[in-house]
């Protein structure tokens, strides 16, 4: 059972992530190629993979818990996309195996106080093929520090088979910025840093003289936490100047099962507790609360972080580890597996201190993606119903607050008799989204 939960979480929380740890993506570069410094990036490591290696690293482990039919559909979509790629010459495919380059870079961005931060990202793209699109892929909740994009390939990397130049940024608090306090669901910061990563990718393509089609289009996609970061990235693109927007040339944004409204998410957790339901992923409670304390330290200075948690939760060490940015989700999830909200969140403290709860929720409101702006580019909002981790109410809020002629919506209805696990309910839409993007 423990192994099953770890496998399930490895995809559920990482969005498009693979739970494979069989092979690291990166190897050290030759000394003469180390630290290429141009524009807004430094190349640290790179490697080349065949199509079979990329597929194996990306999809390994998925069939163990999503079912062979869903796994085979995704595998076929990858192979079809790769078969349709245009090569430099018609004879290339028969001479050279399909190759993909993986590159770890660092780039400059800013944190919640607009202070400079060195962040990291993984670039993946096809070699010997015409690159016709650029793709910013935002990952879901991190699965320990070893499973962020710059450490291992993930299912996102398979999108390079569409002919895309892909970048997958580590969020602030992970990767090269691991010394920075974790900001988790700070949509304002992650949207900005992800767009900075996209600009760094375009700088990289120019500096490396990649065979990028002059009529390329850009895409943004993400699932779970990555779904909300992708919506935040769209908002950030619209804030950039006209020249930058023209350079990005955004065509479409895909957002799957994202926590767009943190207040509504927390209120739904409380409502579900009243209905006797267990939490699908209890570890998000300290992650979200911690990110609000880190995002607004002055506003939250009169509150004590640990007061929000039960003594039982504190004895696990999970809230403290989250606060110190030391422990990954797999370890935390096992300690909070099968817990109800009252075993984690100190409901007595909240009841006795309503102002403290209101202060926390007010901070969450500042990260609401469902109000105060309108999409100007094509965006698709997809959500599973039910979703045992990110409440469906997030989708309803986003549709109510954002829907216009640019917004397409899709509800993935889950048969709870066949898929009873809250985690599997959450990730099923990821497979639907991946197949659609691979067919772009």
Image (cartoon, rainbow, N blue to C red):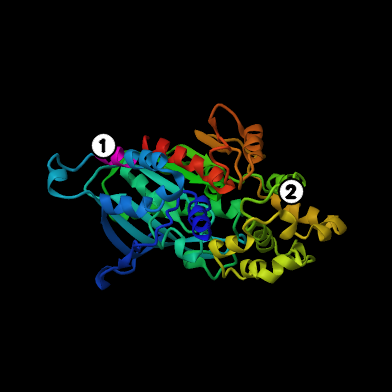
Residue at disc 2, secondary structure: helix
Magenta stretch containing residue 298, yes or no?
A: no
Instruction: Please identify, in this view, whether the residue under mark 1 or under mark 2 is nearer the observer.
Output: 2
Secondary element type, mark 1: loop
Q: Are the residues flagged by discs 1 and 2 in contact, CB closer than 8 Å?
A: no
Residue 84: which numbered mark, if any? 1
Where's residue 94, x and y in %? 13, 44
Circle 2 is placed at which residue position? 273
The residue positioned 52% from the left and 41% from the top of the image is: 255
Tell me residue 211's x, y (percent). 26, 46
Q: Residue at x 39, y 39 (%)?
A: 69
Q: Check the picture and name the quadrant holding the C terminus.
A: top left
Any part of residue 243 in sight: no
Q: State the image quarter where residue 88 is shown.
A: top left
**Which range is magenta?**
78-85
Quick one: 103 or 116, which is closer to the camera? 103
Instruction: Give yes or no for residue 82 being in the magenta stretch.
Output: yes
| Residue 136 in sight from this viewpoint | yes
Q: CA distance from mark 1 to mark 2?
A: 49 Å
User: Which residue is most to the right?
Assistant: 352
């Amino acid at each position: 059972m423990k192994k099953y939960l770890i496998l399930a979480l490895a995809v559920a929380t990482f969005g498009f992530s693979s739970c494979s740890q069989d092979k690291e993506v990166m190897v050290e570069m030759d000394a003469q190629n180390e630290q290429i410094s141009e524009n807004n990036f430094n190349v640290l490591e790179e490697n080349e993979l065949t199509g079979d290696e990329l597929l194996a690293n990306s999809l390994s482990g998925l069939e163990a818990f999503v079912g062979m039919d869903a796994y085979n559909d995704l595998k076929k979509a990858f192979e079809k996309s790769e078969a349709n790629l245009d090569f430099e010459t018609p004879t290339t495919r028969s001479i050279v195996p399909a190759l993909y380059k993986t590159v770890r870079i660092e780039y400059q961005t800013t944190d919640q106080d607009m202070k400079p931060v060195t962040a990291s990202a993984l670039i993946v793209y096809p070699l010997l093929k015409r690159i016709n699109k650029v793709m910013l892929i935002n990952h879901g909740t991190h699965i320990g520090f070893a499973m962020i994009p710059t450490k291992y390939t993930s299912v996102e990397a398979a999108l390079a088979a569409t002919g895309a130049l892909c970048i997958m940024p580590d969020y602030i608090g992970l990767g090269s910025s691991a010394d920075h306090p974790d900001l988790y669901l700070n949509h304002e910061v992650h949207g900005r840093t992800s767009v900075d990563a996209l600009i760094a990718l375009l700088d990289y393509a120019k500096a490396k003289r990649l065979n990028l089609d002059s009529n390329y289009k850009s895409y943004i996609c993400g699932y779970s936490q990555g779904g909300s970061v992708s919506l935040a990235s769209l908002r950030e693109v619209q804030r950039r100047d006209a020249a930058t927007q023209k350079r990005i040339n955004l065509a479409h944004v895909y957002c799957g099962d994202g926590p767009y409204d943190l207040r509504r998410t927390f209120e739904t957790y409380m409502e579900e507790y009243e209905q006797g339901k267990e939490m699908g992923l209890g570890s998000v409670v300290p992650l979200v609360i911690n990110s609000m304390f880190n995002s607004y330290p002055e506003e939250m200075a009169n509150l004590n972080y640990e007061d929000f948690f039960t003594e039982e939760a504190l004895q696990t060490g999970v809230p403290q580890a989250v606060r110190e940015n030391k422990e990954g989700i797999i370890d935390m999830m096992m300690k909070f597996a099968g817990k109800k909200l009252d075993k984690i969140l100190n409901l007595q403290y909240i009841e006795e201190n309503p102002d403290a709860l209101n202060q926390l929720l007010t901070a969450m409101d500042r990260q609401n993606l469902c109000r105060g702006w309108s999409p100007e580019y094509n965006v698709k909002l997809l959500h599973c119903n039910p979703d045992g981790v990110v409440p469906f109410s997030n989708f309803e809020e986003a549709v109510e607050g954002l829907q216009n002629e640019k917004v397409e919506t899709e509800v993935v209805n889950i048969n709870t008799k066949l898929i009873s696990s809250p985690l599997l309910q959450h990730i099923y839409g990821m497979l639907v989204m991946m197949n659609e993007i691979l067919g772009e």
